Amino acid sequence: MRLKPQQTGYVAGKIGIDLANAPFIVMPKGREAVVAAIKNIIDENLHKEHALDERVKKIIDENYDEIEFQHADERQLFFMIKKKMAPEFGVIVNYDDRYNDLAHTILDELYENYLIEYDVNENKILNVIFKGFKAFADAYEQLDDLVYEKIKHMKRELVPGSQEYELLYERLYQEELSRRGML
């Protein structure tokens, strides 16, 4: 699952809750500081991917005539180019590998800035962080479908993409995250 910019706070919050609930972790500066640091790392990673996507789009636009002439599948071509250029932008395309890499980056940042203390093997901490990413990714599809169905069955009809729809979607999405202990 690819994270959207508005979701990074949710993921950071989920990981922060999981770390706070782990009996072998102490947060000297509080959970809010931990969540803020995690969010910054995820945002930076997302920014790199966005820069890569923009570069790939530019390449496709520059070669549009050739792509049309060859009847190439633009979407498949996009992902092939993205995969080839990903190392240049510091982006890991495989999501499990990416979450693992982010877990290491997050742990390093939290430890170096005295945001967490622990006396267990760091793999235990990495597992908590990685599982936070996976739990959010797994729950996202279910939550998205659930919120969509709630909106679909409302008395008044909302147009997807409208401001009213997006605000309602966001509110219902947050409620579901809260119900599941992810906020």
Image (cartoon, grey):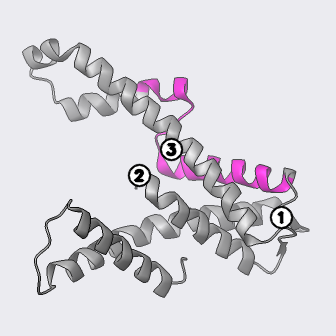
Residue 52 locus on image (x, y percent): 44, 30
Q: CA distance from mark 2 to mark 3?
A: 9 Å
Q: Dot 3: what SS?
A: helix
Q: Residue at x 35, y 25 (%)?
A: 56
Question: In front of the other: label 2 or label 3?
Answer: 3
Q: Dot 2: what SS?
A: loop
What's the residue type where badge 1 is placed?
Answer: Ile
Q: CA distance from mark 1 to mark 2?
A: 27 Å
Q: Taking the image as drawn, is residue 131 in sight?
A: no
Q: Residues within 10 Å of mark 3 (few under 14, many from 20)?
A: some
What's the residue type where badge 3 is placed?
Answer: Leu
Q: Which mark is residue 2?
A: 2
Vertical position of residue 78 compared to residue 102: above or below: above
Vertical position of residue 122 compared to residue 55: above or below: below
Determine whether, in the image, residue 180 is placed left or right of residue 44: left
**Is the stretch drawn in magenta largely helix, strand or loop?**
helix
Q: Magenta segment range? A: 84-111
Residue 68 locus on image (x, y percent): 10, 19
Decide whether residue 40 is among the magenta residues: no
Q: Which mark is residue 116?
A: 1
